[in-house]
Image (cartoon, rainbow, N blue to C red):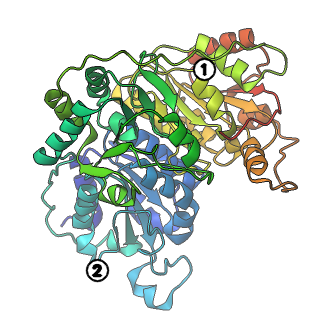
Amino acid sequence: MATVRDTTYELLRALGMTTVFGNPGSTEEPFLQAFPADFQYVHALHEASAIGMADGYAQVTGAPAHVNLHTAPGTGNAMGNIVTAWHNRTPLIVTAGQQTRQMLLLEPRLTARRPTELPQPYVKWAHEPVRAQDVPASLMRAYATAVQPPAGPVFLSLPLDDWAQPADPLPEVRTVATRFAADPQRLRQFAAALAEARSPVVVLGAAVDRAGAWEAATALAERLVAPVWSAPAPERTAFPEDHPYFQGVLPYAAGPLAERLEGHDIVLVVGAPVFRYYPHIPGATVPEGARLLHVTDDPEEAARAPVGDSLLGDAGLTLAALVELLPRVDRPAPAPRPDPPSVEDSLPLSADALFAALARHWPEDAVLVQESPSNLSALRRRLRLRRPGSYFTMASGGLGYGLPAAVGIALAQRHTGRHRPVVAVIGDGAFHYSVQALWTAAQLRLPLVVIVPVNQQYAILKSFAELKHTPGVPGLDLPGIDISAVARGYGCATTVVETPDHLGQALDLALRTEGPTVLPVPISTDIPPLL
């Protein structure tokens, strides 16, 4: 008779989920025993890294990824990146071991107390099956929940003695819709408002990229002859950044953001919150007299918006429908985004000089993973991305995501056969949050390049301290860390880069290397403005 374990693996095969990310623990070994030859176990040295890798992998493949954690301590270790997966709208099935049912009443060592509460509120559903036989059906429900919009992580707590129990028949493998179209009447109302607008502006968010809707977004902007902004702090890019209508990324503070939108009477926000802020700088959400129209697939996001009218629907389907409804207009093209000023290559390099050099040597089909908050403005100024699926970062603002996500993204490039080069820009502070992810990249021989701007400080916190007038904060400097030595210790190639020419040479070599390369780059310690 088939066991619960046998039936679960059969279901995972049917769902195409044969890659498992995790760090093994005693409560997971009954599930992992005699690991099937047709599955791949991606071994992370820390549970947060396992979640980050699975997140990056799922975003590239467009399908849920499975992460196996070690009961309550492992789930606790993973929580930071579970929060990020929630904000990133990444479909993950997170399973965690639980002590044997026969001892749960005694709460022995490694018992998960109230296991379904631990990951809340950052999972869409959390469950511990009442019967062992319910494990496969719970997994099927978890899959269906994770992929439906807004997508996100789900959590299952699974007692270790369940796996050997006799199973019920395999649950029916179901499919569910992962996109939904907008209400036609409300869609026509939005189209009419846009058609009558004197000076519309379009603000695009990550859901446009998740929906594969760059072409529709470009067609809409060109139909409206409207400038296009990226929503603040986007986790993915949504529009070709070399397009003459593209204006850049909106600031993540209310007052400055509204100033950028001055002169527009209609603000169309598609696939982003209204709005994602960081420092509190008071101001209106949109300029006085402007009307905001919001398209989202998340009812909670629509409810949170402080102004405007909302329309629920998939970003790509809604953009395409609006293009069909809108007449062509005769208005002057928006002024193009100005080029950034030239930079000097004095040593150590400024962040702008580093990223100007990176832009000169950037492979056309490369994927950027970013986690360098203090250098983000310089990076986005200098490097303009031109292809969908080319930019990934954390929507949560929490560090420790970028490095393992880059590993998962590189693995997905291999598994999907796309083989796009992956370049991560990780600040020297963020580098150490999930540094053990380098070991997984080295063991899998993934062709990953990690550029580390080294300013020996948490510069983003110094910027925030200057803005909020909070001098004397301790713990903001990071002296005495040898990043090259750390990288070599995990099995990576590494070289310190100090000049733009050396960056080009080192990047070219790293992109041709089998395995990960870490390139520390000393940069200026000047504190950039937060906005």
- Crowding at label 1, few (<14), some or many (≥20) Cα neighbours within 10 Å? many
For the C terminus, the image quarter is top right
| Residue at (60, 10) in percent of width and height | 360
To which residue does mark 2 refer? Answer: 130
To which residue does mark 1 refer? Answer: 382
- Asked if residue 173 is positioned above or below residue 430 in the image, the reply reads below
Does residue 145 show up?
yes
Relative side of 161 to 526, left or right: left
In which image quadrant can residue 404 be found? Answer: top right
- Crowding at label 2, few (<14), some or many (≥20) Cα neighbours within 10 Å? few
Is residue 103 or residue 347 the one in the foreground?
347
Is residue 41 or residue 36 the one in the foreground?
41
Q: Position of residue 82 (x, y in %)?
A: 48, 57
Number of the front mark, 1 or 2:
1
Relative side of 392 to 291, left or right: right
Describe the element under mark 1 as helix, strand or loop: helix
What amino acid is found at the position of numbered circle 2 in the picture? Answer: Val
Q: Position of residue 138 (x, y in %)?
A: 26, 66
Relative side of 401 to 488, left or right: left
Q: Position of residue 307 (x, y in %)?
A: 38, 54
Q: Position of residue 189 (x, y in %)?
A: 17, 43
Describe the element under mark 2 as helix, strand or loop: loop
